[in-house]
Image (tube, rainbow, N blue to C red):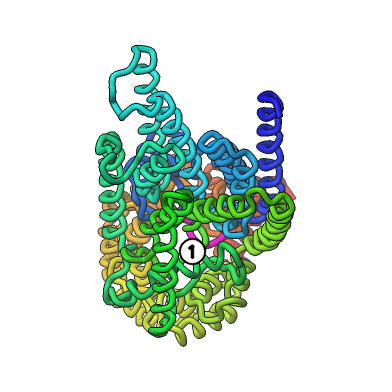
């Protein structure tokens, strides 16, 4: 084939791959947000929801609200909200486009590295269409995966151009002026893209090691033994510095926010035992993707299973080292897979999962390089065998695509997602907890309580179970039981502001405003940017007659979340008592705009409109309050009075 024909084929393959990736995950456009991190990242995050503004961008670059420092990811979500608001289809579309771009970039990258167009296309297709990609692509909160990998691809692409410009000279050797300039540009681009990738998701800390692997094969810049060049390590020092800094910031952020699981919850022995088993489970899922789920709970593995998994890893490692010279792609692919999983293999445990599909997004590429290049070499000179393998690869791609399409549908909403998880893993504590929350938000209290009961049977002292039960008891009016459950949640998880906010609500309902204020202050100490805690603190202080402090608390709540209708309404009541009528009316109007179904705010706005003689508007808002909450006696009485006043004025 001519050079122009080869180039044309390459771009046709890129187009087909991109379209296939978009088509396979297209059902995501009909999916909503889910209650696993999506509220923290988008739907309940005011900084993100309000688009670009000075305070929001400052927060993007300073926050570790979700355990990571990833300002580029925050900016990505903010841009989506600027463009689409809270319409989930737009957020999903961005992730789909990034994933399709990653697939195309992988094809181009492998093709440039190896010159093997067909093999590169197969690896890229296995990467792009695999059902393990669903979690990274379809879960909105996991935007950091597809975004960070986009910068990962650009980083490696720039590095390859840097290596090509060196023309296999030792790093930093003298070169012609023009070449030297290009070398510096591509080196700077490599470092810059890497920094952006780390600011999207710090899991990219393994990239300097991957660059060393690529130096060995296919770039062939690195040799072991007498010809080993330390300059190839030296040129990676800035990358290792960025890696160390990102790792430190990530660990401190996760440790401060309580994301790093303690040794008491997951002892070191349990973590070490999980490592070889997790590696083999990842291997299994890459080649046999069955029973995929949004969350995989920890399992107590038998000694024989642990030993067998460790032995398998040792055997494969020995084999690829034995063939390292004759088939270097085997060693590169295998250590790519092993090394890139290290940050997520559980030695430093963040969260309660034993493994996760999203963690395979980049590591799986190494395995596909091993398989595709290995089978190609096996079929060398055997036309029929090579044709059969190509057909098998096409069939595998179709099967993976169908499975990915079906698994994408599991993310339709939170209920669908966690019911699907429980079908595969009936004892998944996380699924029961989040289904309970799903039913609480829908007001289906019996179903919520049933899932809490099942979660308690799995782990009696789980703090989330206690917190959910506290919310249920509050709804049922069992305030003392709610307080008891909230206190148990705090005892089990002392560094969470959420359970303290639940406790504060229970104390407020009981009328113990001193205790409520203390709980709110403790929640604020743990998370100063929690608007609900500030709002509840304002109410507790107001009930104690601390008007100035209450006003300051409400104003702080509105600084953190200007969309808090309750804070606007309560602050309006304070202004009303102080006869600051214009300010009170502004607050009531804002509360009604934000939450038209807020009966008390409608009632309050009706009162101040009536005071100003705007009877028709006052009656309309009072009617709305009665319609929303028929049991609001004061609204019914005011409506009758306003109607009578209007009749008198009209002369009827």
Q: Where is residue 569 in the image (x, y as percent from the top left)?
A: 46, 53
Which residue corresponds to mark 1?
A: 356
Question: Image point 36% across, 43% down: which residue?
Answer: 212
Relative horizontal placement of residue 625, taking residue 48 as reference (left or right): right
State whether residue 643 is above or below residue 479: above
State whether residue 7 is above or below residue 459: above
Region in magenta: 34-40
Circle 1 Cα neighbour tier, 10 Å, few/some/many (<14 / 14–19 / ≥20):
some
Residue nearest the observer in this picture, 260 or 229 = 229
Q: Position of residue 478 (x, y in %)?
A: 44, 83
**Residue 401 in sight in this render:** no
Question: Image point 27% across, 36% down: which residue?
Answer: 238
Residue nearest the observer in this picture, 31 or 1 = 1
Residue nearest the observer in this picture, 463 or 236 = 236
Q: In which quarter of the image is residue 526?
A: bottom left
Q: Quadrant of residue 254?
A: bottom left
How many labels sit on residues?
1
Relative horizontal placement of residue 610, taking residue 339 as reference (left or right): right
For the view shown, which residue lies furthest in the bottom direction? 457
For the view shown, which residue lies furthest in the front direction? 381
Question: Image point 62% across, 59% down: which residue?
Answer: 131
Q: In which quarter of the image is residue 110?
A: top right
Residue nearest the observer in this picture, 285 or 199 = 285
State whether residue 509 is above or below residue 41: below
Relative horizontal placement of residue 30, taking residue 468 as reference (left or right): right
State whether residue 363 is above or below residue 437: above
**Residue 72 in sight in this render:** yes
| 503 magenta-colored | no
Q: Position of residue 506 (x, y in %)?
A: 39, 73
**At numbered mark 1, what does the secondary structure look like: helix, strand or loop?**
loop
| Quadrant occupied by the N terminus | top right
Q: Position of residue 77 (x, y in %)?
A: 50, 43
């Amino acid at each position: 084939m001519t050079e122009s024909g080869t180039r044309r084929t390459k771009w046709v393959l890129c187009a087909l791959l991109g379209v296939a990736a978009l088509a396979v995950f297209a059902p995501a456009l009909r999916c909503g947000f889910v209650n696993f991190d999506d509220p923290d990242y988008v739907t309940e995050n005011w900084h993100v929801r309000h688009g670009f503004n000075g305070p929001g961008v400052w927060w993007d670059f300073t926050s570790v609200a979700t355990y990571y420092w990833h300002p580029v990811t925050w900016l990505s979500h903010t841009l989506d909200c600027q463009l689409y608001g809270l319409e989930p289809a737009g957020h999903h579309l961005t992730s789909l486009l990034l994933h399709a771009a990653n697939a195309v970039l992988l094809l181009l990258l492998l093709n440039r590295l190896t010159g093997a167009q067909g093999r590169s296309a197969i690896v890229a297709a296995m990467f792009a269409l695999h059902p393990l990609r669903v979690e990274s692509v379809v879960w909105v909160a996991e935007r950091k995966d597809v975004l960070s990998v986009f910068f990962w691809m650009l980083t490696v692409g720039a590095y390859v151009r840097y290596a090509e410009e060196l023309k296999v000279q030792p790093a930093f050797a003298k070169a012609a002026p023009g070449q030297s300039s290009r070398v510096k540009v591509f080196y700077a681009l490599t470092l810059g893209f890497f920094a952006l990738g780390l600011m999207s998701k710090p899991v990219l800390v393994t990239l300097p090691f991957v660059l060393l692997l690529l130096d060995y094969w296919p770039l062939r810049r690195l040799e072991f033994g007498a010809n080993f060049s330390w300059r190839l390590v030296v040129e990676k020092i800035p990358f290792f510095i960025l890696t160390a800094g990102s790792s430190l910031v990530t660990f401190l952020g996760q440790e401060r926010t309580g994301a790093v699981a303690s040794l008491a919850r997951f002892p070191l022995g349990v973590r070490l035992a999980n490592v070889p088993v997790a590696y083999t489970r990842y291997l299994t899922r890459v080649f046999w993707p069955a029973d995929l789920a949004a969350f995989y709970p920890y399992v107590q593995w038998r000694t024989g299973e642990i030993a067998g998994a460790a032995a398998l890893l040792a055997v494969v490692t020995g084999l690829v080292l034995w063939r390292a010279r004759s088939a270097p792609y085997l060693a590169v692919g295998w250590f790519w897979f092993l090394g890139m999983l290290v940050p997520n293999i559980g030695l430093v445990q963040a969260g309660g999962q034993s493994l996760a599909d999203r963690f395979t997004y980049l590591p799986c590429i190494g395995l596909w390089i091993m398989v595709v290049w290995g089978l190609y070499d096996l079929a060398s000179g055997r036309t029929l065998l090579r044709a059969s393998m190509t057909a098998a690869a096409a069939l595998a791609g179709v099967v993976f695509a169908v499975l990915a399409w079906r698994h994408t549908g599991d993310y339709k909403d939170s209920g669908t997602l966690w019911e699907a998880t429980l079908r595969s893993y009936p004892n998944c504590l996380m699924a029961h907890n989040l289904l309970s929350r799903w039913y609480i938000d829908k007001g289906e209290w019996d179903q919520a309580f049933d899932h809490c009961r099942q979660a308690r049977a799995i782990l009696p002292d789980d703090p989330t179970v206690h917190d959910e039960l506290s919310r249920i008891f509050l709804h049922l009016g069992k305030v003392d039981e709610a307080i008891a459950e909230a206190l148990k949640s705090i005892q089990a998880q002392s560094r969470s502001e959420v359970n303290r906010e639940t406790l504060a609500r229970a104390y407020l309902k009981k009328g113990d405003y001193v205790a409520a204020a203390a709980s709110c202050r403790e929640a604020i100490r743990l998370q100063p940017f929690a608007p609900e805690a500030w709002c509840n603190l304002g109410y507790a202080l107001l009930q104690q007659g601390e008007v100035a402090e209450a006003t300051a608390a409400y104003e702080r709540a509105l600084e953190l979340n200007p969309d808090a209708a309750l804070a606007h309404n309560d602050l309006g009541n304070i202004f009303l008592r102080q006869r600051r009528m214009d300010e009170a009316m502004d607050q009531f109007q804002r509360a009604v705009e934000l939450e038209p179904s807020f009966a008390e705010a409608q009632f309050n706005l009706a009162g101040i409109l009536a005071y100003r003689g705007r009877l028709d508007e006052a009656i309309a808002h009072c009617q709305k309050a009665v319609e929303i909450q028929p049991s609001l006696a004061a609204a019914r009485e005011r409506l009758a009075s306003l109607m009578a006043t209007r009749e008198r004025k009209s002369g009827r």
